[in-house]
Image (cartoon, rainbow, N blue to C red):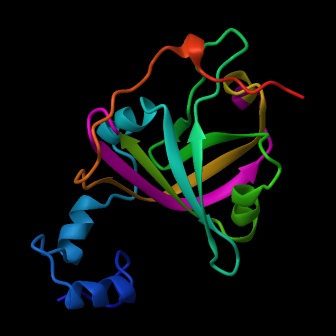
Amino acid sequence: MDDPASPISHAGEIEMRARLPSRHKINEDKLSKLMQDHINSSLAGFIEKQPFFFIATANGSGECDANFRARNTSASGRPQALLLIADSRSILFPDFAGNGFYNSLGNIHQNPHIGLLFIDFQDQRRARINGQASIASPTASTTELWPEAQAIIHVDVKEAYNNCSARIPKLKAYTNTQKMVRLKRR
């Protein structure tokens, strides 16, 4: 039986497992083997090769927002790093000037919880990272990676795991970086 005081599951997840039993028989012991508090080398390799990922944030009232992050390209058309795995418990990624809404940064400012979802549609694989985010100014080393970044998001990893690959459509990746869309500065 699941322990309601578990550091892995919350009461809502435990209740749903009781109401809607799954053939997978998920319990705290199984979850503790699947969910890590760090990024192992296999997961790091998968994450680093992705061209994009999705983030989920929520404001101080819990109202959610989902967003998309992708590799930026240099003036010469070369793709920049999507993110940096600083160590097994830390990820850095850039925030570039966008539409000026600041949904994600505003949410992180009020509520540091963040979810990152990585999906490889070609190999039909996905992974998730959940953690605590903070906003920092670019440093000399991050400016080398992302010259146009206005801020750097630092994620302290709390949960890292591969996620079910069911129902991921198989799509072919477009890899011609010379034809990547670049926003013109106004």
Q: Quadrant of residue 48?
A: top left
In the current view of this chain or complex, which residue is farthest to the left?
23
- Residue at (71, 22) in percent of width and height: 144
Left or right of 90: which side holds 182? right
Rendered location of residue 108, percent (x, y): 69, 62
- Assess whether residue 130 is covered by the magenta stretch: yes
Q: Is residue 76 above or below residue 4?
A: above
Left or right of 173: which side holds 67? right
- Assess whether residue 64 is covered by the magenta stretch: no
Q: Magenta stretch: give its range.
A: 121-142
Q: Is residue 33 above or below residue 166?
A: below
Rendered location of residue 58, percent (x, y): 63, 69
- Residue at (18, 69) in percent of width and height: 30
Rendered location of residue 3, percent (x, y): 27, 88
Q: Quadrant of the C terminus?
A: top right
Rendered location of residue 23, percent (x, y): 9, 73
Q: Quadrant of the N terminus?
A: bottom left
- Residue at (24, 68) in percent of width and height: 31
- Residue at (74, 56) in percent of width and height: 105
In the current view of this chain or complex, which residue is farthest to the right?
186
Q: Is residue 118 above or below residue 76?
A: below
Q: Is residue 80 above or below residue 152?
A: above
Left or right of 11: which side holds 113? right
